Image: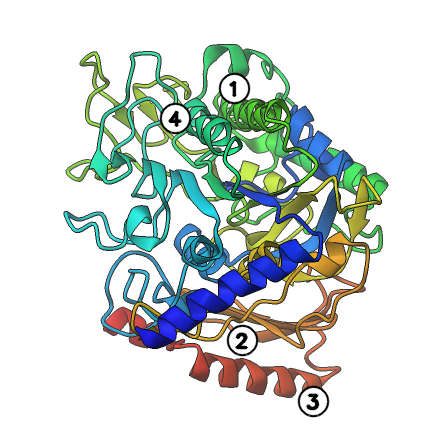
Amino acid sequence: MQTTRRAFLGSLAGAAAATAAGRKRPNIILMMADDMGFSDVGCYGGEIHTPNIDRLAGEGVRFTQFYNTARCCPTRATLLTGLYAHQAGIGHMMDDRHLPGYRGDLNRQCVTIAEALRPAGYHTLMSGKWYVTPVTESKHNWPLQRGFEHFYGTIGGAASYYDPVTLTRDNTSIRAESRSYYYTDAIADNASRFIGEYARKPEPFFLYVAFTSPHWPLHALPEDIAKYRGRYKDGWDALRQERHERMIRLGIVDRRWKMTPRDPDVPSWREEPHKEWQAKRMEVYAAQIDRMDQNVGRILGKVKQAGIEENTLILFLADNGGCAEELRRTGKTWPYHAPVKTRDGRAVRYGNDPGVTPGPDDTYESYGKGWANASNTPFRLYKHWVHEGGISTPLIARWPGVIEKKGTLTHQPGHLIDLMATCVDVAGAAYPRTYQGNRITPLEGKSLRPVLEGRRREGHSEIFWEHEGNRAVRQGNWKLVSRFPGKWELYDLAADRTELEDRTADHPAKAGELKQKWEAWAGRANVVPWDQVMKA
């Protein structure tokens, strides 16, 4: 406890020194989309109407080579702690494999951003999806038990947008408030309420806004779907080409990188037997992102109304690449996150069925591999895998009082582990060595602040990934990657970020070096071979 107290006093001293030097500590708002592809929003090449996210980009900086961890739970653990997910205990999902890196529950050898910033005088608030602890009766790892003062959102990972399970306010489970309830709106309602209340206080605040949009189920409001009626009638092949050309013009991707071929499991649009239904799926998906963008606009409007715009750092990103998962009609089983009936008693039609138009509350569908392939234009693979399509995310930063060159791109690589480091840095806080009597794993990330200030930062010598046996390491422009249970592949990302030309045979020494580095990282980061995890 004495060591924890010293860390606490040290963080206060750091904050006081920053204030004394004339730098008022900023408010920090961290917003994240769920299962959104690299090319979906307008400022990254998408056709979806996202004027508010695009405005963030126009007033800030866009990262073109920022990475997540390819799946929702590991990403949230990494984002919150500044560690690789296995170090925080969540190397996979919420099932407990009784291995240190795969307990499916945030461990006590890490601290969250809220736990790091709160001792430094920050108010800590959250609205949205938590999903770093199992859905049980235990509240030991709910947000208020991990440093947040207030929380509104869902503890679990997926739910109906009209009647979400695991909905919680602070430490109390609740139900949707009204018949007109829509979860994306409710997340922004509560985030805006937090801003209005805490902007009036003398202390700064940290607000984590974790949207579930556009994660399945495909639930969107009729007025939003109507905007996209007929937009996707030409199919995923045309959409991929359209987006790729726009991304090149925007400078998001290099024209030297060839677009990946259509996924071999996806038919050409000409051969697709259910064109009308498929187009409807993408219309609803786009509408979900559109509604999220509207709510980003509401949050930005509240920041401006509160008079804190100049000194508020806003970050926006996604938790993994587009999701190719198909929801199968379940037969005897029914997942906990899907209601059996709507709130007015109608049966929910679970699973992807070409005879069912997605969008309303009595449906529960996903948008599938063909559209996920388009979402991740021009990269390979999807959520789950650690090729570029699974791990590449938009990252937009806006901080009007600090970012001088507005609307710029940076090609400097970064990783989710850097977000904790950035928050600690700009807050004048201290990352603790111990917390509540527990020794804390040293921080893995490096602050992005130099990039925001228009400078080059000293990046990572290597960054690493593992999920479900899919493995990767990036060193400079070299990336070694493997799709489980396949062999290692080596790519020069400067020339070939779409990972089409394996250079292993040309550079065996580099491949061997990176393999050794990955294995050394795996040994220290609690990573276990996937076949052993599955047997545990």
Query: Image check: 371 left or right of 221?
Result: right
Position of residue 362 measured from the top left corner of the image (x, y, whole percent): 30, 19
- Under circle 3, the secondary element is helix
Position of residue 11 measured from the top left corner of the image (x, y, whole percent): 50, 64
| Residue under numbered circle 1 | 276
Measured along the vertical axis of the image, is residue 492 above or below residue 266?
below
Nearest to the eye among marks 1 and 3: give it. Answer: 3
| Separation (CA) of disc 1 from disc 3 | 51 Å
Measured along the vertical axis of the image, is residue 58 above or below residue 357?
below
| Residue under numbered circle 4 | 183
Residue 466 visible somewhere in the drawing: no
The N terminus: image quadrant: bottom left
Q: Which of marks 2 and 3 is nearer the N terminus?
A: 2
| Residue under numbered circle 2 | 487
| Residue under numbered circle 3 | 509
| Separation (CA) of disc 1 from disc 2 | 39 Å
Nearest to the eye among marks 3 and 4: give it. Answer: 4
Query: Image check: 91 left or right of 270?
Result: left
Measured along the vertical axis of the image, is residue 382 above or below residue 216?
below
- Under circle 2, the secondary element is loop
Q: Which amino acid does label 1 sit on?
A: Glu
Q: Which of marks 1 and 3 is nearer the N terminus?
A: 1
| Separation (CA) of disc 3 from disc 4 | 51 Å
As drawn, the label of residue 312 is none
Report the number of numbered marks: 4
Query: Image check: 53 left or right of 33?
Result: right
Q: Which amino acid does label 3 sit on?
A: Ala
Q: Which amino acid does label 2 sit on?
A: Lys
Along the viewing direction, whichever of 253 and 191 lies nearer the viewer: 191
| Separation (CA) of disc 2 from disc 3 | 16 Å
Q: Which amino acid does label 4 sit on?
A: Tyr
Residue 111 visible somewhere in the drawing: yes
